Amino acid sequence: MQICHKLFAVLLLIVSIWKVSSGSIKSNGEDQQNEIIAGKTVDTEEKIKFLVNRITKANQQLEDYKEIIKNLQNEVSKQQEENEKLKSQLQKNTNELKYTEDELGQCQRNYTVFLKLFKEEWDAYEDDQERIFETCQKYLEAHKTLREKSENNHKLLETNFESLRNETSYKDATINELKKGLAECELRYKEQNQTNKDEVASNNSTSKNADISESTTISKSLPSSCVNMTAGIQEIQIGNAKPFKAMCDGDGWMIIQRRINGTEDFNRTWKEYEDGFGDLNEEFWFGLEKIHLATNSTRQRLNMTIRSGWGADPFVIHFDDFRIGNSESFYKLESIGNYTEDWHTRNETLLKNNVNNAFSTYDANHNGNPELNCASYGAGGFWFSFDCLDYNMNEPTNGYWTSVVKLRPYSD
């Protein structure tokens, strides 16, 4: 813009010089004519020289102005080149800005999708927390009610204790007298039948030896555990008990419980828990009677591998002396031994609080509390406590948590 202003000023100056020169020549001509007309003598040569000088100076100024115009034109060309460069840079910046806007739009779309997924996960998490809170509230209310009833029962027991003790003392004395009479009868019976017993023992000796030999042969032909057995279903025999099928893991462990996807219903009857149920290749419960046989034949180690959520890392818990009682004790959890694990200590009380508890199912409640059936409430059998505040590994699961429980002889 400044260059245009300069060029316009130069043109105005050239026009002014031209006008002045033309005016001067015209004025001189008129003066000469007047002088001739007036009869005055004029020195024409001097005036011509003056005019020539004036024209020469004007031409010189014109050349100077041409040089100025030429310089101005060069500056205009340079300015145009710079403008082209700026225009190119502006186009490049515009393209980069458009690319940045596209990237920003994609980021916004991704962020929107992320927020949606996060909200869904958060809503699911809040629903789980609400269900857990409601379950804890029910447990606390049940625990409070049980404690009140327990206190009342305790007072009632204290009130009746003295009378029961007196009655017991009387019954003990009566029992002692009966025992004395029974002992005398047994002594007489033994004396009268001693000869007959000797004869029967002699006659049956051969038959018993044959049975013992056959039983020993069968016992030696089948393993009593999964030690040194390949992975898969194997036939096991413990002592003289009837052989049974067992799932071995290939590392010497016999699996007694497996939950992997929640397809097997573990809310079963007492008979089913006693005998076992499910598919050994999938989810199953081995059976209380077989677990009793295994844990009472020799000292057993227990291994529990638990995953407590989708995508969570499993943790392993070990007990070095696991043992349960027989059917007469309702398969009471008699011992778990020492405890170790490879995760953290939050599960330190797992099974520890269940020692000396009998096993319960929804149709056979043995937790010592007839008014609260923990197995029915928890929808699965276990060694429940009086107040049901136990970790139940047989409760329903849709695969959110999984478990594998195994036995292995301690000495191997």
Image (spheres, rainbow, N blue to C red):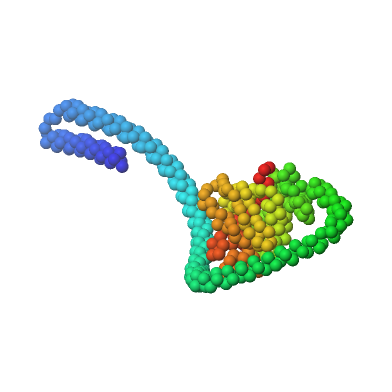
Counting every numbered tag in the picture gives: 0
| Residue at image location 22% in from the left, 29% down from the top | 57
Q: Position of residue 118 (x, y in %)?
A: 50, 57
Q: Residue at x 68, y 46 (%)?
A: 409
Where is residue 78 shown, x and y percent of the image?
Answer: 37, 35
Image quarter of the N terminus: top left
Residue 157 seen by the camera: no
Residue 306, percent from left and from top: 60, 52
Q: Which of 305 and 401 is in front in this view?
A: 305
Q: Is residue 383 left or right of residue 141?
A: right
For residue 274, what is the image quadrant?
A: bottom right
Q: In which quarter of the image is the C terminus?
A: top right
The residue at the point 58 percent across, 48 percent down is: 338
The reply to whether residue 4 is visible in this rendering is: yes
Percent position of residue 89, x then y: 42, 40
Along the viewing direction, whichever of 298 and 31 lies nearer the viewer: 298
- Foreground pick, 105 / 400: 400
| Vertical side of 20 occupied by 124: above or below | below
Foreground residue, 116 or 195?
195
Q: In which quarter of the image is residue 83?
A: top left
Drawn side of residue 228 relative to residue 76, left or right: right
Residue ID at (52%, 70%): 161
